[in-house]
Image (cartoon, rainbow, N blue to C red):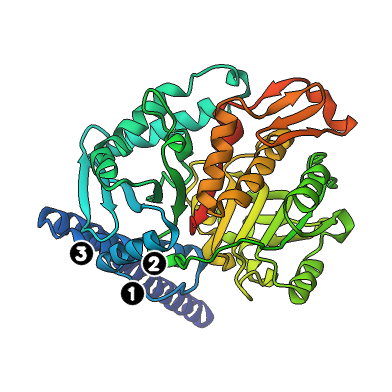
Amino acid sequence: MYHQKWKKRIIFCLLFILIFFSTIILNILLVKQSAIAVKEEDWDRFLEQKDFIEAVNQVEQHWERDYEKYFDENLGDFSVTAEDIAETLSNISQQTGTKPAVIWVWSRAEQLQLVLITPGKKPEIYSVSDADKPQLINTVRRLNVEITNPRKRNTKSYLESAQKLHKWIVKPLEPALEQEGIDTIMFCLGMGLRTLPLAALHDGENFLIEKYALTRIPAFNLIDTNYNKIKNAEILAMGASEFKELEPLPAVPVEINKITRFTWQGNALMNQDFTVNNLQEQRQKKSYDIVHLATHAEFRPGKPERSYIQFWNDEKIGLDEIEKLKLNDPPVELLVLSACRTALGDRQAELGFAGLTVKSGVRSALASLWNVSDIGTLALMTEFYQHLQKTLLRAEALRQAQIAMIRGEVGINMGELSGTRGELQLPPELSEFGDEIFSHPYYWSAFTLIGNPW
């Protein structure tokens, strides 16, 4: 009896301790949720008060915390305000000869919220009441499905969603964009929108990319806006065409050879030479402003370690350890991942994709939202690098490449890849694709520039 009483007391004490600590943890979680809710209410409060400058500052701070929470680290102290952004845009405009703007887009419960800042101007706020959150997210998902569905590759089934999203996101801003002569837009997108194929939005006559050079940013505070010309830049191009468990990429050798031998001066390393150690060693010998990785890369749901870049012989680098590549020492001007796949619509995958430049330390990254066909990727990359030589502005080079594909100027004909700068003879293993043009958004709208557009 004596021992049973003590057992009961011990069990009671353990239960009390468990309940006590559970209560503390629950209160902490509630406080965090409450803090987030307060911040979201602050947006509404500042918008209602027409304090648009502070509203932008609140959005920037909130989204910076989103990425810090996802990567579980401090990514930098918030410092750039709405006034600073307008001034930065003016300075960049003078340096680059472009007219850039930043657009923040996020979904509130009953409406879509848009904020626009142009060079030297105060923020302008727009609300779209006929685009509530469920309708907006469903339309984004519909657009992704219609573009990526292989059965609809020869149709324009994507137009309904593309035009509806253009009407909501871009049309309210068009008078201001045209008045300011804007030609380059940085989109800062909220949850559920970060993997939207912006280039495919359509005004009824043209795609958005035909009018503006586009890039997406995680937050203005989280990107390096300095303008550095990449003229005469050297490229380190690495990749693999064969994998143990993943599908082969037979166009990769052609892609890397074309880039390094005929387009840019650089170094090419394939298959067994495509290792993390080799990349580090090559960067120690020479800085290389452009690093091109032609391999599988995936942005998956869940924590950053689930997302990865594939190297040779089953070697992978998770997004959580991408610092090991030392792409920020010195900073790479442009990182290209030419065979990506992203879990469209997943919040964590979106944060990983849009936060790629932040975590890797590069100024800009070119990556794809979905896994474009091997030959389609070759076509886009060939065009992109050729235009980059001419324009030197990253977002504009991507825009010109995508326009060439839209207009049917890029395709396969009689075993040759034709483009705006001539033909490229394809090896026998790629000749099975037959004649094809790449004007459908599936082939070009997946590719997006993240970070600095210049």
> What residue is disc 2 on?
221
SS at badge 3:
helix
Expressed as whole percent of the image width and height from the top left, the position of residue 370 reads 60, 40
How crowded pointer 2 is (Cα within 10 Å; few <14, some 14-19, many 20+) is rated as many
- Sequence order check: which comes first, mark 3 or mark 1? 3
- Residue at the image point whose x is 20% and y is 36% from the top: 129
- Sequence order check: which comes first, mark 3 or mark 2? 3
In the displayed structure, 26 sits above or below 339; it is below
**260 left or right of 207?**
right
- Residue at the image point whose x is 45% and y is 46% from the top: 214
Distance, label 3 to label 1, CA atoms, is: 13 Å
How crowded pointer 1 is (Cα within 10 Å; few <14, some 14-19, many 20+) is rated as few
> What residue is disc 1 on?
79
In the displayed structure, 82 sits above or below 190; it is below
Q: Amino acid at mark 3?
A: Glu
Q: Amino acid at mark 2?
A: Asn
Q: Amino acid at mark 1?
A: Ser
Q: Are marks 3 and 1 in contact (CB under 8 Å)?
A: no
In the displayed structure, 202 sits above or below 319; it is above
Expressed as whole percent of the image width and height from the top left, the position of residue 308 reads 67, 56
Q: Are marks 1 and 2 in contact (CB under 8 Å)?
A: yes
Expressed as whole percent of the image width and height from the top left, the position of residue 421 reads 69, 37
Which image quadrant is residue 275 in? bottom right
In the displayed structure, 289 sits above or below 205; it is below
Distance, label 3 to label 2, CA atoms, is: 15 Å
> What residue is disc 3 on?
54
Q: Nearer the viewer, residue 310 or 454?
A: 454
Q: Are marks 3 and 2 in contact (CB under 8 Å)?
A: no
How crowded pointer 3 is (Cα within 10 Å; few <14, some 14-19, many 20+) is rated as some
